[in-house]
Amino acid sequence: MSEELQQQLRSQLWTVANNLRGNMSASDFMYFTLGFIFYKYLSEKIEMYADDILSEDGVTFKQAWASDDAELKADIKDECLSNLGYFLEPEFLFSSIIEAVDRKENILPQLERSLKKIEDSTVGQDSNEDFGGLFSDIDLASPKLGKSADDKNTLISNVLVALNGIDFGLNEASDIDILGDAYEYMIGQFAAGAGKKAGEFYTPQEVSQILAEIVTTGKTRLRDVYDPTCGSGSLLLRTARNGNADTIYGQEKNPTTFNLARMNMLLHGVKYKDFTIENGDTLEADAFPDREFDAVVANPPFSAQWSAAEKFNSDDRFSKAGALAPKSKADYAFILHMIHHLNDGGTLACVAPHGVLFRGNAEGKIRRYLIENKNYIDAIIGLPPNIFYGTGIPTCIIVAKKCRKEDDSILFIDASREFEKVKTQNKLRPEHIQKIVDTYRNRTEIEKYSHLASLQEIAENDYNLNIPRYVDTFEEEEPIDIKAVMAEIKELEAKRSELDSEIEVYLRELGIIEND
């Protein structure tokens, strides 16, 4: 599929969503639309797969299922469960629902059964954790879909018919990520209109690219990649693709966003056996307590609250730092958690608010521990303000490694002034991203942009990592020529006096003012 057709698919999907959501908010309608896209994808994929394995028998999936050959049906089901991870009988396919719409039927009961059939088919299978509860957020009885049953049926029917008119291009095997990319585009578009909550489930693509490029520096293949606050999974997918990762691991607290992340994985062609996304609070209930990873990436919620309970003083993730992150600001709890899960040869890159660079008390102690005791901090990258949905605060990227040399310096990059303003959002363009990545990889010092600070220099600044302490971006103003300014003022005064005289002549001619 060409780039033009890919853009067309994105545009079509977004137009469908935008035109049909009516008075429903973007965030409310998002899960319905994305869920139905995913349902269509699973339906088309299993029908295409079953037709392919039955091609030698000269029958289609629907024809085989209409036969009395129980053994053939069992073989088809086993094959699909083994390779796709789920199964769906022909009567519950998306195309069958469309046929019911054409017959002017109430499709909601059949659609509800269809979505449940997908989940139920995985019970007892290896894929159960990845498919179970995937459609739990699609409430077809929701009053948000309409006041009456007929209103709900009409809206959902219109959505499905509109989606049916879009070719996902699944027959083009070489472009397996095309639909996934369009789906991710949809998530981004919904995030743009979802206000403050958007940052909880989506990391802008340009930031994801920077993080992915950093953690894959010097590596041709990652064994695994991990995101403890994975949201919709876009950052994980980008990093896995960049690093040719074998397996993907993530955890997400919000159940709805957790479902979105699993859908996103499958739509990008990641096999259910190659990813593990868990639902739960990363800090309070770590889903991967004994694992270390080649790459750790994250965009945790900024300065979130957490319990900071006494039990964490004996938790291996936090106990050695000598202090717990404060209850009102969990930033360092997330950072310590991520470092705990990083293997000796791995790289961590995460987004954080600037406060983590200079705030004192417990956070100051943790920061000093990470630098003085462990020498884990590899780079600090300042990003422009207003590049995340829902917040305009400036942010930074913290890069950490466990096996740095004793005298390794910390690289500071101030990329906060290089961006393009697009409407109300600031955007990083490819040249901005490339400059950040190249500067990090080459550890280059650029005047007013980057600086390599020795650990001694850091110590002299009392372990304060605030970027302006290390990257001087001050621009001297040109000296003012007072004599030239005074001469210009006199010239302007003379011109004004001349203009006043001309205006007075016109006013006298018009009789507005009397002649002396």
Image: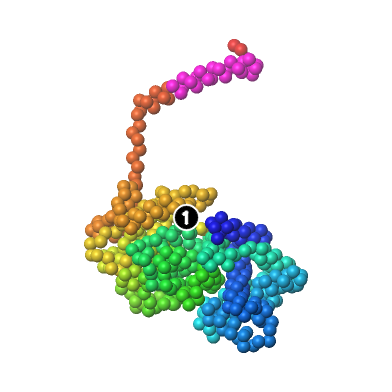
In the picture of the structure, the residue carrying the numbered disc 1 is 387
* x, y percent for residue 115: 63, 76
Main secondary structure of the magenta stretch: helix
* x, y percent for residue 134: 57, 75
Quick one: label 1, few (<14), some, or many (20+) residues within 10 Å? many
The residue positioned 32% from the left and 66% from the top of the image is 401
Magenta stretch in the rendered image: 491-514
The quadrant of the rendering that contains the N terminus is bottom right
Q: Is residue 148 visible?
A: no
Q: Is residue 63 left or right of residue 397?
A: right
Q: Is residue 124 left or right of residue 142?
A: left
In the image, residue 405 sits, relative to residue 439, either above or below, namely: below
In the image, residue 257 sits, relative to residue 9, either above or below, namely: below
In the image, residue 247 sits, relative to residue 10, either above or below, namely: below
Residue sitting at the far bottom: 71
- Is 378 in front, or is 90? 90
- Is 339 in front, or is 490? 339
Is residue 509 located in the magenta-colored stretch of the structure? Answer: yes
The residue positioned 41% from the left and 77% from the top of the image is 288
Residue sitting at the far top: 516
* x, y percent for residue 339: 35, 70
Amino acid identity at mark 1: Ile
The residue positioned 54% from the left and 85% from the top of the image is 124
- Is 344 in front, or is 75? 75
Is residue 312 located in the magenta-colored stretch of the structure? Answer: no
Query: Residue 63's quadrant in the figure?
Result: bottom right
Element on which disc 1 rests = loop
* x, y percent for residue 73: 62, 84
- Is 61 in front, or is 29? 61
